[in-house]
Image (cartoon, rainbow, N blue to C red):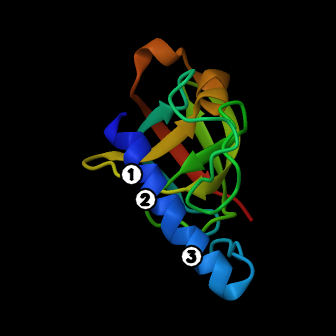
Amino acid sequence: MSKKIIRRAAIALGLMGLVGLTGTLVATPANASQMGTLATCNATWYGAEGEIPEGWPTASGEPFSRWALKAAHNSLPFGTRVKVTYQGRSVTVTINDRGGFGGATCLDLTYGAFIQIANPDLGVIPVQYEILP
């Protein structure tokens, strides 16, 4: 079992405990001061066939789908919509997961989102992203 799956399982189990105590997990989009923010970083992708089971809970509790237009970010609130651009091609994703990445990498796009803007064989790409209202 890969470290990524084990990490996601631990996060999911922790969130299941939170959901059990509160009854629901609420998505809180980015605040007004963050909206329209433009930034650059590296983006990667996850959700290779067989890597994460379809329906497996993401960090937000939402079921994982490798084809969904979603992404992981370390600090943006769940539910935040982000426009990601690479070489003139853009995709709008919703933050529903967390990532354990470092350095200049700040976004982990689902496979379905990544292929909208780049060939997955590239693995890591430099992107510009904008937080949408």
In the rendered image, the vertical position of residue 121 relative to residue 96, given as above or below: above
**Quadrant (top left/top right/bottom left/bottom right) for the C terminus:** bottom right
Question: Depth check: 62 or 20 in front?
Answer: 20
- The 10 Å Cα crowd at callout 3, few under 14, some 14 to 19, many 20 or more, is few
Give coordinates of residue 95: x percent, y percent: 62, 56
Asked which quadrant contains residue 96, the reply is bottom right
Tell me, yes or no, if residue 117 can be seen here: yes
**Quadrant (top left/top right/bottom left/bottom right) for the N terminus:** top left
The answer to whether residue 7 is left or right of residue 85 is left
The answer to whether residue 120 is left or right of residue 60 is left
The residue tagged 1 is 7
Question: Depth check: 13 or 85 in front?
Answer: 13
In the rendered image, the vertical position of residue 121 relative to residue 49, given as above or below: above
The amino acid marked with disc number 3 is Gly
Farthest-out residue, bottom? 22
Instruction: For marks 3 and 2, give the CA distance.
Output: 11 Å
Give coordinates of residue 120: x percent, y percent: 51, 18
Give coordinates of residue 36: x percent, y percent: 63, 63
The residue tagged 3 is 17
Mark 2 element type? helix
Determine whether label 2 and label 1 are within 8 Å by CB.
Answer: yes
The residue tagged 2 is 10
Q: Residue visible at 60% across and 41% down? A: 84
- The 10 Å Cα crowd at callout 1, few under 14, some 14 to 19, many 20 or more, is few
Instruction: For marks 2 and 1, give the CA distance.
Output: 5 Å
Disc with the residue nearer the chain's start (1 vs 3): 1
